[in-house]
Amino acid sequence: MSTPPPILAAGDRFILPELFAEAAARRLGERADISTLQLEWPDVPFHSVGGIHEASGTEEELLEALQGRAAVLTQLAPLSERVLRESPDLRFIGVSRGGPTNVDLRTAQELGILVVNVPGRNGIATAEMTLGLLLAAFRRIPTAHDSLLERRWRGDLYRYDQVGREVHGATIGLIGAGAVGAHVARVLAALGAEVLVFDPYLAPGALDGIAEQVAEVEELFRRSDAVSVHARLSEDTAGIVSAERLAAMRPGGILVNAARGGLVDYAAVADAIRSGQLGAAAFDVYPDEPVDMDEGVLALAREGYDVVLTPHIAGASRETAARAAEGVAEELRRFLDGEAPLHPLTEVPR
C-alpha cells in the first residue's frame, strides 16, 4: 500500500471520531493522514437536509472538513448531492450503519465514489435488548420495580392472577430472522421456548432444530403467546402488526418491537391492551420520534398497564460502536489495497 490518502473521520457522540481514526490507523499505519469532525447526534436529533435523511450536522461544516479529503468514515454526516459534487477529491465513503439514508447513492454512483456500509453491526445489541424487553414483559419487572420506587411492597405480585409467565414452554413468534431475529431465535430456543419464524427470505431449513418456519404471518399470530418484530420496514412490511392480527393472538399475549415503529399499528396495540387481548407490550421504537410524551403507548404506561418502554436504544452498545468503526476501516483498507469491498452500495470500476 502506498501512502494512504487524506481521510476524514466524521464521528458523532455514539461512534466517536477517535473510534474511526484509531480503527483506520491500525489498518493503514502511522502514515495515515486522518482529520476528525465532531457531530452532535444524539445530543442533537438527526434531521433531513439536501434530499437525504437521518443526518447530523450541516452541509457547510462537512464541506469545509472534506476539502482535500479522499475518504470519509462516518455514521451520520450529511453526504448530500451538493456535498458530493463540491468535494472533488472524495473517492470513498464508509457509512458505519445498515441503512445509509444520509448518503445520496445516485450521485455517488454517477461521480464514481465507492460507498460501503456495515450491515448487522448492531445485530447482537438489538437481539439482547429484545430479549431484555421480552423478559421484562413476561415477568412484569417494570411493574415490580416501580412499586418499590413508590415505597409500596407489592406482595400481591405473588398471587396467581398477578404473577408473570415463563419463556420456557411459551410459543414465541418472530417476524423476520435476519441478523437480529436469528440470534433471538437461538437464545429463546436455548431457554426452552417453542420458536416460530415468519420470514419469506429465509432459506428453508436455515433454523432447523431452533425454530419452525411458517409460511403465513397469520399462522404465527394464531399460534403465539408472544410476537417479536424483526423485519425491515418496507412497503410489504409496513403495518404488518395490525388490529386483525393482534385479535388472532391468544388472549393475554405479549408484543415486542425493537425494529421499526412503522411495522406496528400502535393505535391497535393500545386498543388490544385496554381490552385485555394483549397482556403486555414492550417497545423501543415508535411511529414518530422523539415521541409525544402525553399520548400513545406512553399514556398506557401511566395508566398502569404492563407496557415496557425504552427510547430507541436497542442497537446502542459500546461493542456496536467499535464494530461499526472497525467495519468501515476494513473496507477502506480493502479499497486502498485493490481488494473487492465486502458490502458495496455503489459499483465503481477498478
Image: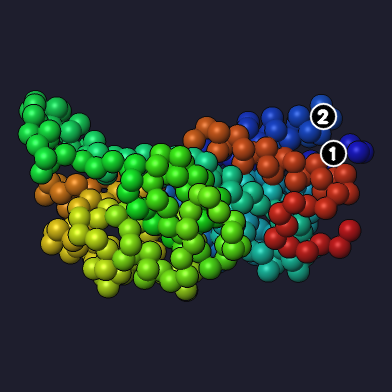
Q: Nearer the viewer, residue 324 or 39?
A: 324
x and y percentages locating residue 13 in the rendered image: 50, 37
- Quarter of the image for residue 288 reads bottom left
Q: Which amino acid lies under the numbered mark 2 shown in the image of this protein?
A: Gly
Asked if residue 156 shows in the view, the reply is yes
Q: Is residue 219 left or right of residue 150?
A: right
Mark 2 closeness class: few <14, some 14–19, many ≥20 residues within 10 Å = few
Question: Measured from the top left, where is residue 230 in percent x and y?
Answer: 45, 56
In the rendered image, the vertical position of residue 227 relative to residue 65, given as above or below: below
| Quarter of the image that includes the N terminus | top right
Q: Which of 135/84 is in front?
A: 135
Q: Residues at badges 2 and 1 in contact (C-beta under 8 Å)?
A: yes
- The front one of 283 and 312 is 283
Amino acid under disc 1: Pro
The residue that label 2 is drawn on is 29
Circle 1 residue: 4
